[in-house]
């Protein structure tokens, strides 16, 4: 029954006709409000901000504050209830949805894998024509090569339904390898390192720096250590951006971000005592 429910869902409506061969990555939100149909109030309300081409923006704040929804609007998984989002000064709604997503890579905490080989899970869909060398390089840059080569069949190893034979951290490394292989100018990282422990995530910082270099990047992360080096950090609290700035600027402000940072520092200290 679940399968038929999915098949009965309406196809995404797409009135966009503009196709972009290249994207620089400038994004602008102009008075954007979004409200789910079943909700009593907006998740995001009257947002106005710009992301410069090649800039790395981090979104932090409490659960339910609208971080993932904001990122989903950029990918046109949802359409704004009102207002407009622009990519390179063109309204997103005017850009063909498939063309937009060709310029976009998304790495989320929920990684979808197919019951196929590791190589085909890294290079699938539009990436299926990638060479074995390119797939291997992406895996190496995602720090996945060591565990892949330790498997009996290496890149030919079957991962099971939705990657059940791999750990959460291994699945996320494969998702990051996909993003590296795609080499898209727009990148969304939604809790992309949530399955890694703190030490692994710290060792992973150099990989993240390579991944975001030269791309317009939106990072959503609970651990503030992941977002400290972002060009700007936006703090979302209940439908609004309540403050923004660099890590140092926000700590100096002593407001929302500073309190989040102090709270995480206390939690880390307590964890290290046991």
Image (cartoon, rainbow, N blue to C red):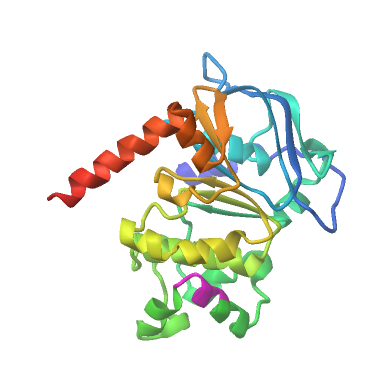
* Image coordinates for residue 120, horizontal then vertical, percent: 54, 73
Taking the image as drawn, is residue 64 in sight?
A: no
* Image coordinates for residue 113, horizontal then vertical, percent: 47, 62
* Image coordinates for residue 272, horizontal then vertical, percent: 19, 51
Q: Nearer the viewer, residue 72 or 125?
A: 72
Residue 173, image quadrant:
bottom left
Taking the image as drawn, is residue 271 in sight?
A: yes
> Is residue 49 positioned above or below 222 on the image?
above
Q: Residue at x 45, y 36 (%)?
A: 251
- Please report the bounds of the magenta region as a residue range: 138-143
> Does the magenta portion include 148?
no
Residue 165, image quadrant:
bottom left
Q: Nearer the viewer, residue 46 or 202?
A: 202
* Image coordinates for residue 231, horizontal then vertical, percent: 60, 47
Q: Nearer the viewer, residue 91 or 255?
A: 255
Q: Main secondary structure of the magenta part?
A: helix
> Is residue 235 positioned above or below 52 on the image?
above
110 sits to left or right of 272: right
């Amino acid at each position: 029954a679940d399968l038929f429910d999915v098949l009965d869902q309406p196809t995404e409506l797409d009135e966009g006709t503009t196709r972009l061969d290249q994207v620089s990555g400038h994004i602008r939100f102009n008075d954007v409000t979004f409200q789910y149909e079943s909700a009593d109030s907006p998740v995001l309300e009257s947002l106005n901000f710009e992301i410069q081409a090649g800039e790395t923006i981090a979104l932090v704040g409490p659960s339910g504050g609208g971080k993932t929804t904001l990122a989903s609007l950029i990918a046109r998984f949802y359409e704004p209830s009102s207002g407009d989002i622009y990519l390179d000064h063109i309204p997103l709604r005017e850009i063909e949805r498939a063309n937009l997503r060709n310029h976009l890579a998304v790495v989320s905490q929920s990684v979808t894998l197919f019951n196929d080989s590791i190589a085909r899970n890294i290079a699938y869909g539009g990436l299926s024509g990638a060479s074995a060398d390119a797939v291997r390089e992406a895996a190496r840059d995602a720090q996945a090569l060591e565990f892949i080569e330790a498997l009996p069949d290496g890149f030919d190893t079957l991962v099971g339904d939705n990657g059940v034979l791999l750990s959460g951290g291994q699945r996320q490394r494969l998702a990051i390898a996909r993003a590296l292989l795609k080499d898209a100018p727009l990148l969304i990282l939604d809790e992309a390192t949530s399955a890694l422990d703190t030490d692994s995530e710290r060792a992973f910082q150099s990989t993240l720096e390579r991944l975001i270099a030269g791309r317009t990047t939106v990072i959503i992360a609970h651990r503030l250590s992941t977002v400290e080096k972002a060009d700007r950090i936006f703090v979302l609290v209940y439908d609004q951006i309540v403050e923004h700035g660099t890590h140092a600027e926000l700590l100096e402000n002593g407001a929302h971000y500073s309190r989040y940072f102090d709270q995480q520092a206390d939690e880390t200290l307590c964890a290290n005592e046991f």
